[in-house]
Amino acid sequence: MKRRVWGTAAAVVAAVTGVVVFQGVQGDDGGKNGANAPLVTGPVRTSVHTASVKAEGDRAEVPERDTAAFSLVGLSWTKPSAQIPGTVQVRTRSARTGAWGSWITLDTGGHGAAAEESRRGATEPAWVGPSDGVQARVDGRGTPLPAGMRLEMVDPGAGRVAMNADPVAFAADDPTATPGDETSAPADTATEAPTQAPTDEPTPSPSTPSASDPAPTATTTPAPTPTPTASGTATLPPAPVSTAPEPPVVTRAQWGADESLNNEAPEYGTEVKAVFVHHTVDANDYSCADSAAMVRAIRTYHIQSNGWKDIGYNFLVDKCGTIFEGRKGGVDRPVIGAHNPGFNTNTVGISVLGEYTSIDASAAAKASVARVAAWKLGQYHYDPTGKVDLTAGMDNGKFKLGQTASFYRISGHRDGFSTECPGDKLYASLPGIRTLAGGPVSGLALKTFGQASVSGSTAYTKGPLTVNWAITSPTALVSRYEVLVDGKVANTATPTATSASLSLAPGTHTVAVRAVHVSGRTAVTPNATVVADTTAPSFATKPSVALRAGTVNTTAVPVTLGWKAADSAALKEARLTSPSAHTYGPTVYSAALTSNSGTATTWSMTAYDQAGNTARATVAATPVILQETSATRTGTWTTKSSSSYLGGKSYSSSSKNASLTWKFTGRSVAWAVSRASTSGQAYVYVDGTKTATVDLKSSTTKYRDALWTKTWSAGAAHTIKIVVVGTSGRPTVTTDGLVYIK
């Protein structure tokens, strides 16, 4: 069934059978509830204000009228089996703004979810927020309306619970409290004390685990029959210990349940075989500070308007993930609720506040549902991801009395009853909730390795390192983490941990993290390769400096810095730290740089491996410029002057076999020349041996160009002789001196 909110645009809002409607409100009622409300310190007195609705054939109307304060509204009638085949619409006036809201259509599909207990017929209630006025209209569409109709307006009282706080003990309920039957409605108000009907509960069928269910240590648990004590007070036997931890639950005392509203003792099944998930429908924009008030309102409506024994659900969860205790009897007991007709015994009903037909419930809410389900099913050693056969205890429109059907251990309300609950989106999330509850841990992933360097898919460390991971499952459903090195457990961590330390022997290892779910199921990350390396890299070839081709300046002599670093595991980089700073990759073995002439320069390098080990090496070099005037000349040479020449002068010759000879002691040398399109050629002799013919021709004019170079492995005395070839048509050679490194 769908609920409709009637306004100018007649917007359609989805809803379901067997649920509570919440009209969109912001949770601000001037401090009575919401974030400004006082904290609950004891029972909160709620009240139901009623207004009779007089039928005229198949129609009835309640004109706009003032009312006492209320936040939830519904329509009830005398006979539980009677139905309204048409529509019931209400609209309310905001106590905060004084504005009338849109018409909303209440669900008239009946209360089959708790038909065993109903003493009055009723629609599903609608949470409308703080209101002080109401209007209603009922259309039976040709069918006479049931007798005894009245509007039920619930004031949830004031009080909120501390958010994000673990449960704490509250003072005992006020023993002087009396049933909350007071009303402040107009003269036509009708008040009816709740009475109870015999319970027609399901016939338990043998639990039939699926192949995925682990063999339970006990297939059933005896019903917790109260045992008289010496004082005559009945006590319950200890509750079964669960395989999953008990989540924090806001108790009835904490959310302000007024226990004087219902004095009947709770009823129990023998175990918890399955969990049914519900939603309470419509507004998702409520404030979580109002959640306690919403729970109180739902409970009051269930008791005083429907005539049920108590709130129908065993647990309620808000969008912030806060878990509220529902029906009384003990959260750790198999309390029989009123949430799924024919399947209330040996099951648990968990209802999420909000509407989840078109949007999904929050991750926090789904995690809390999973935590409750894992805990309750774990008390009886049932696998939350498995299946079970259940037998209907009544005709409910979908199943016949005594009919057996297979259900997931965590199912939706719609699986057992003709309803859309818990909404399409939340229903589609049930497989994920089963995995959260039953394992394995979801979303387990290695994130980083602290104190380690990562290259590609391999991490490197020279000492202890930190393994970091993340999950998407609730940590409360994790038993422990195990850090595996080469497939063996090397360290363990607590459920809330996200990292662990490791010390590895030198060598290559595989590292993984295994998460153990409370169910025992495990999830393991893919192996990561980690290399523990304590050996420093080395310079297989020590740094050296050599002259290179390029333009020579007195403050920038072109040089090549050469080296070769290596590592037994993986070299990361080589860094030049002086006289300038540069970083080079592991396969780079040289760099083109410049150096001042006439000044000794120390070149400092550091090699780094991937693990962070280092090695250092240095080399010192002094480039020296020898002017052409320092050479021994033969033949005819002409002196040229220009600021473009080294020292402002150069020698030029067109005479064949004219020569210049320099002597020096060093390990690298370069001949600097001036070049043009008419430049000729020259022979170069090294230590008396002709080693090269150098062509000075250039399409562009160049000065101080180191055109020819030679380097030796060590410094020694050398002689360089330049001889003019006398090239036909372009015989001229212009020299600008010699540069060497000593």
Image (cartoon, rainbow, N blue to C red):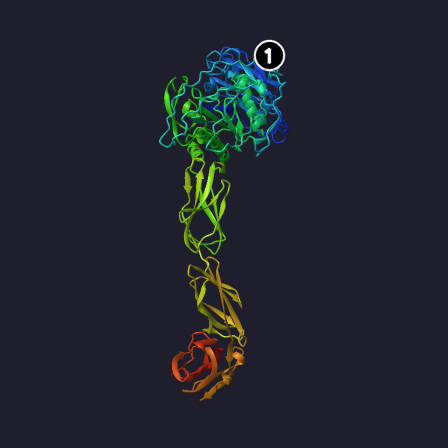
The single residue placed furthest to the front in the displayed view is: 230
Q: Secondary structure at mark 1?
A: loop
Residue 573 vs 324, above or below: the answer is: below
Using the image as rendered, state which of residue 221 and residue 337 is in the foreground.
221
- Viewer-proximal residue, 648 or 279? 279
Q: Which residue is mark 1?
A: 188
- Residue 263 visible? The answer is yes
Tell me the quarter of the image containing the N terminus: top left
| Rendered image quadrant of residue 258 | top right
How far across and how far down the image is residue 273, in percent? 42, 26
> For residue 299, what is the image quadrant?
top right
Query: How many discs appear?
Result: 1
Residue 484 placement (x, y as % from top left): 43, 46
Asked whether residue 361 appears in the rendered view, the answer is: no
| Residue that protrudes farthest toward the bottom in the picture | 635
Q: Residue at 58% x, 27% y: name it.
A: 254
Q: Is residue 651 above or below residue 379?
A: below
Identity of the residue drawn at 35% across and 31% down: 211
Is 7 above or below relative to 590?
Answer: above
* 336 and 432: which is toward the camera: 336
Tag 1: amino acid: Asp
Report x, y in % for residue 590.
Answer: 44, 67
Nearer to me, 664 or 449: 449
Q: Residues within 10 Å of mark 1 (few under 14, many from 20)?
A: few
* Rendering coords of residue 415 (x, y %): 41, 25
